[in-house]
Image (spheres, rainbow, N blue to C red):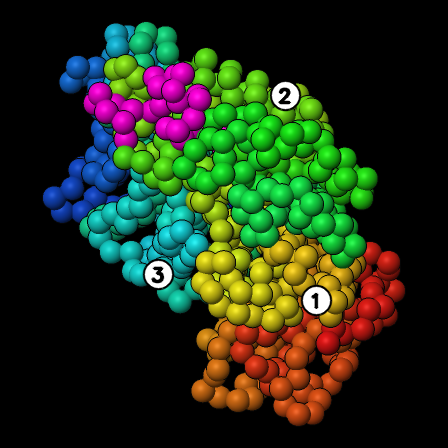
C-alpha cells in the first residue's frame, strides 16, 4: 500500500503532498492550516491545484513537483541540471517507496504536530536515483533536501535545487542586501514575470546575502499579510530565487550554487543538497517566530543563560600587553561580565593583519609564560575564557604558507588576489585539516578555552585545489562544519561564535554547529538597530552577539551616550566591545546597572516571542519580547531621528493577552520634555494596549526607552520582576 496524499500539519501550518501515481511529490497546499480533512477533502484540494490547459500550452496540465521536472512541461527553472556527456539531462523520476514513519495506508496519511516523509525514486533510463526528504517541524517550519545517486557512467552535476509553490496572491518580494559593517539591509519590490535570482559566490554566506527570501501579499508587514519565505541552510556558495511564469505559476526555492565541475559523480557516488527551508507566516513576525521556535527546539540549542561577554578587540587591537589585559579583566568582573574573550593577535608573528595566520602557537615573545597568567586571572575572577581563531585562513607571511604553499586554495597556476593580506587554507586537503585541528585542540586544551570566536575574513576567490585547480568551495564548507563538530565532540560544553568579517556567515547551516553569530563588525548602536531588527527574521535574539560599543564608534566615528549604546544591545546576546579601563566612575556605575538589568530580564529576553510594531513614524521603532504565557513583556521605543511631528501620539503594543490587565512601567529613558513625558506607570487591558496603545515619550534622537509590562494580578517572580529604579 502507498498513500496518495500526505498531510503534514503543525502550529497553524499545513503542507499537503500529492504523491499519486508514482510521481515526485507536489505541494498542492503550503500555508495556513487546513484543519481536519479527510481523503475526499484532500483529493478535492489536489484537484483545485490543476490548472486548465491554456492556448499554446501542453495538452496535459503541468504538474510542479518539489523537484521541478522539465518532462512535465514545466518551463521554469528545472530542479536538476546535469548530464552524462550530453545525455540523461532531463530525467523522469518515478517514486518507488514512500516512508512516513506510520503504518502504510491507502489514500490519505495525516501527520499532526509535524512529521517527516522520505521518498525513493529512480529513472532507469537516465540511471539516476533520487531520495527526497520533506519535514514539517512542530513549529510549522517546512524543509526539504534531495540526494542524487549516479547508477551509471560518470555524471556531471551542475545544479540540484528544490522549490515550493507560491499562491497567485503573493507578488511582493522582500530580501536583503548589505555590505561589510551594514549587513542585512532590507529591499522590497514586485515579483514580475521571470526570475528574482540571488546568487552568493563568495564562498561564505556574505553580508549581502538574501538571507530569507520572502514573497507575500502586497503591503505585508510585521503583523499583517501572508508571507512565504525560503532559506538555503548552507554557508558556501548558494542560490535563492523566486520565479513567476507568464502562465501564472509561481515558486520560491534554491540550493547550493555549484562551480563548474565541482560535483562529478562516479558510479555509485551521491550528492546531497543542503536543507532548503520554507517558512510561512501571517505577517513577518509570525514567520520569524516560527523559525525561532524551530531553532529553540533543537537539542543543541543553548540552554544556559547567555553569558555577558567582553571582547577585547576594540580595547587593545593587536597590542597584547599583559598588564592592560589583566586590568580589563578586573574591570570586567567588577561590572558583572561572565565571559572574557581574547581576540586576534595572541599567536606567533601576529603584530598586524599582514602576518602569522596559520601559525597557531602562542607567541612566546609577547607571551613568555604562555596565556596561562591571563587565563588563570580571568578564571579566578569567575569568568570563562574565550579565544579568537581564524582556522580557514593563512597569511603568505607565515611559517605554514612557506612550508605548505600547496595548501593555499588556488587555480590556474596562480595565487588568488589577496584580501586583508590573506589567502584561504584548503581544509579539503586532509593534511591541512589535520594540522589545523591538532593545533586548535592543543591550544584549547592547554588554556581551558570555553569559547571560540571563529572568524572568516575574506571571500573565496579562485578557490581551487592545487595542483589541478579543481573548484573546492563545497568541500571547504563541509570541512569547516566537520571541524566545528569535531571540536565540540572533543570538548563538551565548548561554544563557538560564527564571525565572518562581522556578519558574513549567518545562516541555518553554520548555526547547526555554533552557538551565536556576530551580527556585524559595526557596533555603532544606530546602525545596529537595523541589523538586529532584520537578523531576527532568521535567528532568535539569544544567538545574536550584541555589544555595548565604545563611546566613539570604531567603524563610523559617531559618538553616542551609554544609554543608547546599551539599550540597542540589550535584546541580544549582551556584551561589551569597549576599553572600559578608560571609563569613568559614573560610566562604570551605569554599565554595572545595565548588566544587572539585563541579567534580571535575560530569561524573558531570550525565551520570549519577538514583536516588532509596524512604524507609526520612520524615526520611531517599537519592538519587544513577550513571555510565552503572555504574563510579562519588555518593549523598547528606539528614537532614531527627528520626526516632522512632535509629539508622535500613541503607539500600540501587540502580542499580549486581550483579556488580561497589564501594568506598564518605565524602566529606562531620557526625558526631553522638561517634565514627566508619560505616566511612570499605567494599567490597561491587553486589548487596549493592542488597539489604543500608550503615549509615545517626547525624546531626543538616538535614545532608547525600555518599558516593563506585567500582568497586574500576577507575581512576576525573581527571574523577571526587578527592584532596580529606572536608569538615569
Disc ID at residue 442: 2
Instruction: Indicate the quadrant where residue 713 lies.
Output: bottom right
Quarter placement of the C terminus? bottom right
Q: Residues within 10 Å of mark 2 (few under 14, many from 20)?
A: few
Q: Is the stretch drawn in magenta largely helix, strand or loop?
A: loop
* Residue 46 shows in this picture: no
Disc ID at residue 553: none
Say which residue appears at 25% left-offset and 38% top-offset: 77
For marks 1 and 2, give the one nearer the viewer: 1
SS assignment at label 3 = strand
**Observer-nearest of 364 and 577:** 364
Q: Which residue is mark 1?
A: 584
**Observer-nearest of 693 and 328:** 328
Residue 172 placement (x, y as % from top left): 34, 59
Q: Which residue is mark 3?
A: 188
For marks 2 and 3, give the one nearer the viewer: 2
Q: Is residue 177 above or below residue 510?
A: below
Q: Residues within 10 Å of mark 1 (few under 14, many from 20)?
A: few
Say which residue appears at 69% left-offset and 45% top-offset: 323
Instruction: Indicate the quadrant where residue 415 lies.
Output: top left
Amino acid at each position: 500500500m502507498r498513500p496518495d496524499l500526505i498531510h503534514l500539519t503543525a502550529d497553524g501550518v499545513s503542507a499537503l503532498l500529492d504523491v499519486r501515481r508514482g510521481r515526485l511529490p507536489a505541494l498542492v497546499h503550503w500555508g495556513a492550516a487546513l484543519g481536519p480533512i479527510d481523503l475526499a477533502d484532500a483529493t478535492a484540494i489536489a484537484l483545485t491545484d490543476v490548472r486548465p490547459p491554456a492556448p499554446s500550452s501542453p495538452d496535459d496540465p503541468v504538474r510542479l513537483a518539489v523537484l521541478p521536472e522539465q518532462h512535465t512541461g514545466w518551463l521554469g527553472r528545472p530542479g536538476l541540471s546535469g548530464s552524462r556527456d550530453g545525455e540523461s539531462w532531463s530525467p523522469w523520476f518515478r517514486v518507488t517507496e514512500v516512508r512516513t514513519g506510520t503504518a502504510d495506508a491507502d489514500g490519505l496519511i495525516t501527520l499532526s504536530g509535524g512529521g517527516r516523509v522520505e521518498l525513493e525514486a529512480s529513472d532507469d533510463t537516465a540511471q539516476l536515483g533520487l531520495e527526497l526528504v520533506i519535514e514539517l517541524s512542530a513549529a510549522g517550519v517546512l524543509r526539504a533536501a534531495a540526494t542524487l545517486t549516479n547508477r551509471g557512467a560518470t555524471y556531471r552535476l551542475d545544479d540540484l535545487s528544490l522549490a515550493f509553490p507560491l499562491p497567485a496572491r503573493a507578488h511582493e518580494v522582500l530580501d536583503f542586501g548589505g555590505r561589510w559593517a551594514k549587513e542585512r539591509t532590507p529591499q522590497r519590490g514586485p515579483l514580475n514575470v521571470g526570475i528574482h535570482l540571488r546568487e552568493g559566490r563568495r564562498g561564505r554566506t556574505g553580508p549581502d546575502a538574501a538571507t530569507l527570501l520572502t514573497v507575500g501579499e502586497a503591503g505585508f508587514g510585521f503583523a499583517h499579510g501572508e508571507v512565504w519565505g525560503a532559506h538555503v541552510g548552507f554557508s558556501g556558495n548558494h542560490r535563492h530565487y523566486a520565479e513567476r511564469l507568464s502562465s501564472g505559476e509561481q515558486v520560491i526555492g534554491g540550493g547550493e550554487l555549484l562551480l563548474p565541475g565541482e560535483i562529478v559523480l562516479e558510479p555509485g557516488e551521491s550528492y546531497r543538497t543542503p536543507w532548503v527551508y520554507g517558512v510561512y507566516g501571517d505577517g513577518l513576525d509570525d514567520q520569524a517566530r516560527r523559525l525561532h521556535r524551530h531553532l529553540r527546539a533543537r537539542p543543541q540549542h543553548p540552554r544556559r543563560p547567555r553569558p555577558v561577554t567582553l571582547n577585547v578587540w576594540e580595547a587593545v587591537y593587536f597590542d597584547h600587553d599583559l598588564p592592560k589585559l589583566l586590568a580589563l579583566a578586573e574591570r570586567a568582573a567588577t561590572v558583572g561580565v561572565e565571559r572574557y574573550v581574547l581576540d586576534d593577535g595572541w599567536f606567533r608573528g601576529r603584530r598586524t593583519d599582514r602576518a602569522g595566520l596559520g601559525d597557531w602557537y602562542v607567541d612566546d615573545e609577547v607571551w613568555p609564560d604562555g596565556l596561562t597568567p591571563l587565563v588563570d586571572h580571568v578564571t579566578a575572577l569567575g569568568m570563562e575564557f574565550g579565544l579568537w581563531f581564524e582556522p580557514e585562513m593563512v597569511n603568505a607571511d607565515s611559517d605554514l604558507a612557506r612550508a605548505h604553499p600547496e595548501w593555499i586554495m588556488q587555480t590556474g597556476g596562480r595565487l588568488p588576489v589577496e584580501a586583508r593580506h590573506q589567502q584561504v587554507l584548503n581544509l579539503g586537503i586532509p593534511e591541512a585539516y589535520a594540522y589545523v585541528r591538532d593545533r586548535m585542540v592543543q591550544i584549547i586544551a592547554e588554556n581551558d578555552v570555553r569559547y571560540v570566536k571563529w572568524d572568516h575574513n575574506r571571500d573565496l576567490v579562485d578557490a581551487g585545489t592545487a595542483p589541478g585547480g579543481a573548484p573546492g568551495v563545497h568541500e571547504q564548507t563541509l570541512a569547516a562544519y566537520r571541524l566545528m563538530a569535531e571540536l565540540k565532540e572533543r570538548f563538551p560544553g565548548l561554544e563557538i561564535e560564527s564571525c565572518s568579517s562581522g556578519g558574513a556567515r549567518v545562516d541555518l547551516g553554520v548555526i547547526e554547529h555554533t552557538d551565536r553569530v556576530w551580527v556585524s563588525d559595526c557596533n555603532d548602536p544606530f546602525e545596529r538597530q537595523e541589523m538586529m531588527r532584520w537578523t531576527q527574521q532568521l535567528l532568535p535574539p539569544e544567538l545574536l552577539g550584541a555589544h555595548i560599543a565604545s563611546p566613539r564608534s570604531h567603524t563610523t566615528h559617531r559618538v553616542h551616550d551609554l544609554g543608547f549604546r546599551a539599550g540597542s544591545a540589550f535584546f541580544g546576546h549582551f556584551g561589551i566591545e569597549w576599553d572600559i579601563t578608560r571609563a569613568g566612575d559614573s560610566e562604570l556605575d551605569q554599565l554595572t546597572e545595565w548588566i544587572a538589568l539585563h541579567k534580571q530580564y535575560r530569561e524573558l529576553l531570550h525565551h520570549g516571542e519577538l514583536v516588532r510594531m509596524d512604524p507609526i513614524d520612520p524615526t520611531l521603532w517599537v519592538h519587544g519580547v513577550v513571555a510565552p504565557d503572555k504574563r510579562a513583556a519588555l518593549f523598547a521605543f528606539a528614537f532614531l531621528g527627528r520626526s516632522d511631528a512632535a509629539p508622535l501620539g500613541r503607539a500600540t503594543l501587540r502580542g499580549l493577552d486581550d483579556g488580561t490587565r497589564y501594568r506598564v512601567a518605565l524602566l529606562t529613558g531620557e526625558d526631553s520634555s522638561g517634565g514627566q513625558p508619560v505616566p511612570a506607570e499605567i494599567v490597561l487591558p491587553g486589548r487596549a494596549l493592542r488597539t489604543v496603545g500608550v503615549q509615545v515619550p517626547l525624546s531626543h534622537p538616538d535614545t532608547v526607552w525600555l518599558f516593563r509590562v506585567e500582568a497586574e494580578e500576577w507575581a512576576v517572580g525573581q527571574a523577571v520582576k526587578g527592584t532596580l529604579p529606572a536608569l538615569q
